[in-house]
Structure formats: structure tokens, C-alpha cells
Amino acid sequence: MKSNVMVSRAVAAVALTSCVVGSTAFAAGPQIVPGPSADAACYAPWSADTKFFKFPEKKGPYRIALANGYIANTWRIQMIQTAKAYAAQPEVAKNLKEFKVVSTGEDVAAQISAINNFIDSGFDAIVVNAQNPKAFAPVIKRAKDAGVVLVAFDNILDTQDAINVNVDQKGLGVLWANWLVKHIPNGGKILEVRGVAGTSVDTDRHNGIHETFDKSGKKWDIVEVVGKWDDATAQKATADAIAVQKKFDGITAQGGDTGVVQAMIDAKHAFVPFGGETENGFRKFCAANATKGLKCSSAGTGPAQVAVAIKAAIDALQGKVIPQSVKLPLAIAEDPNFKDGQDFYATQSDNFFVGNSFPTCGINFSAQEIMGKSKENQ
């Protein structure tokens, strides 16, 4: 999800080469070893055939980088803030010699260049939210050959040679579509508000939605618009769609959901069943308008999954066993069970994603702890 500041390859190179080169990365690649993982409660393997990695133990503290792409929406901004908040926690900070953050926008080549520069600068581990799952094969090989731990999260990498940390994004699309199938018994016209084109999250969620509708045996007319997981973009896209189509029987949106509902209100469109993400503002709307027809399923995973990715990088550097693919739990709230102070926070900003805790990993954040950090590169 992206940055108001686009970082070119040249700028990224200058910023990264100015870093103090620290400890040399250890020998290439991890061993494939039997499970379970060192922290089985936190690191659930994706499936029964997920392999387990064990990197050679390396003495800390470590130099770890976050190579983000898109950052021009609240999820990505909150993710950067959460990463900085996690890195600042005393038990984490003691393991870090340096924590570097770079956001490169939607330019895939710029993000790959940033990762290459982190490898060349001697970073021990790189955490990445990838702009495209299939474009990173050469840099994945470089990281493996250099012994650099590479951990992808949210928008993961199409590889068996890096650690992937994610929720079941396709399953999330299935969940939303099933909600609409349940609440629209005769089928109908659906507005699908998509995310950022080319990312694995957008593709997987979209595929889950459409496959579920196709299997339902009902007739659906699906109108797709691009919201980029951003309230303002999604609000305009929804307003334009309503102006053209006049009426929808249900809505599913991958993000920017607060803006989608606001567009419905502004257009005086009747409230309809909605499958969407975990924005605080969206859940406020769902709780306040349930009796008026806004029946919501709100599910996803908060930006705190970046903290699990950083934790996995540190544990891997310490020689602990980690699944190659880690499956995180979804944070789900559905009508009629939206509770203030638990599922949403009436006194907090709309532009805040809830579900920012992974208790099984010992990870939890207050809104104040996250929002006190900046979104800027460092």
C-alpha cells in the first residue's frame, strides 16, 4: 500500500551508499531442516509441505533494512510507522545496530535497485513489501548467494528461496464474497474496489472474490474500479461508478473502505452488504449504520505484520528455525458484533487500521505508539 515522496534509483543509491558498512553477511543460503519452528506459536507454516529454513547463526547486533514500494495510502504509512515503533522497542532495539527504511513508490526497478544497494552495503537482512511478486528473481539469488536473510510480507515474493510472511489473501477475497453471497440471496450487481495493480495482494484477493461468485450458482454483474487501497482514490472511483451505474446490490473493497462508504452517503445510495478491510473509519460506519442496511464483514491483517517480518529476520539471523512460508491469522469482525473499544475505536482517527496485534508472537501496539513515528525514509 505507498509514498508521497518517490525515490528514484539514483537517490536511493546515494542514500544507501552513504550508510556505514557494517558486518559482512555470512555464507550463502539457509539449510533445509525438519520442523517445527523455534517459535511454533508465532510462525505457523503455510501448509503441511512447507519447508523450514535454518540460517547459520550470526552474532548481533544486526543491520536490517525495510525496502518498501508503494506508500501513498494509510495502510502503507501506518506500516512504516509500525516498523519504526517495533524497531524502537527495547527488546528489539538491542538486536539492531542499524534499521534503515526506504520507500520507492510504484517503480519496480527502483525497489529492486534499493534491495541490491542494501546487499552491496552489507546489510544482514532485508524485509520487503514487493511491488511485483515475479520480478525479483535476480535479486533474490543475489541475497541468497550473499547470505542475506530476505523476508517478504503482505505482497510476497514468488519464490521458495526467501521467507514469506502473509495472511491468506485469496482466502480473504473468498470470505468477502461469501458474505455477499449470504446476504444477497438472488445475486445482483456488485461494485469491486480493487487495490494496486500488479501486486500479489490485489491479484489474490480479486481471484478469491471471483472464484467464489462463480461457484455460487447465482448471477452476478461485477463492476471493477481501482481504489489503490486509499480512501480518497476509492471514494472518487466509487462516486464515479455510482454516477454511471446508479445502483449496486453489494460492495467489496480491498481498502479505502471509509472513502467508499462516504461516497455512498454523498450520492444518497442505499446502504448495502459490504465485505471490506479493517479501517477504523469503515468499522465506525458499519457499527453506526447496521440497522440501515450496511451489513459488514470487516477482515484483514493490520500493518503490524511488518513487525512479524522483522522478528522473523532477527530470529533467522540468530540461527533459529523458521518456516519458509508463515501464515498469519486474520483479524475479523462481522455484523452484528462490532464493539467500540474492541473492534473499532470511536475516539481514534478514521485513518487507522485495527487488528494491530499478534499475541502469539508477543506483538502488540497502541495507536499512540504507532502514530508517534514518521512515514519518511530514514
Image (spheres, helix red, strand yellow):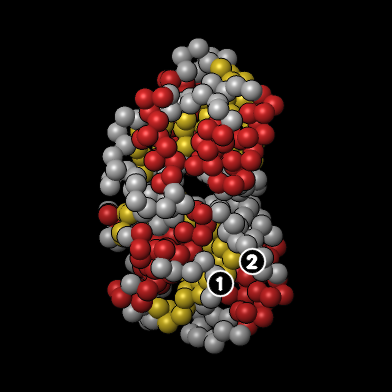
- 374 or 140, which lies in front? 374
**Residue 49 x/y as whole percent:** 41, 45
Q: Against 8, is 266 above or below?
A: above
Side of 15 where 31 appears, left or right = left
Within 10 Å of the Cα at label 2, are there few (<14), some (14-19), or many (20+) other Cα atoms? some
Quadrant of residue 264 within the rendered picture: top right
Residue 26 visible in the displayed image:
no
Residue 251 visible in the displayed image:
yes
Give me the disc on residue 122.
none
- Number of numbered markers: 2
Q: Against 335, is 4 above or below?
A: below
**Residue 52 x/y as whole percent:** 40, 57
**Residue 43 x/y as whole percent:** 34, 55
Callout 2: SS: loop
Within 10 Å of the Cα at label 1, are there few (<14), some (14-19), or many (20+) other Cα atoms? some
Residue ID for mark 1: 377
View extreme (top): residue: 186
Query: Do labels 2 and 1 touch, CB within 8 Å?
Result: yes
- What residue lies at 41% left-to-right and 46% top-to-bottom? 280
Residue ID for mark 2: 5
Of mark 2 and mark 1, the one earlier in the sequence is 2
Q: Against 26, is 70 above or below?
A: above
Callout 1: SS: loop
- What residue lies at 57% left-to-right and 23% top-to-bottom? 248
- What residue lies at 70% left-to-right and 63% top-to-bottom? 109
The amino acid at mark 2 is Val
Side of 190 where 110 appears, left or right = right
Task: State the CA–CA distance, disc 2 to disc 1.
Answer: 9 Å
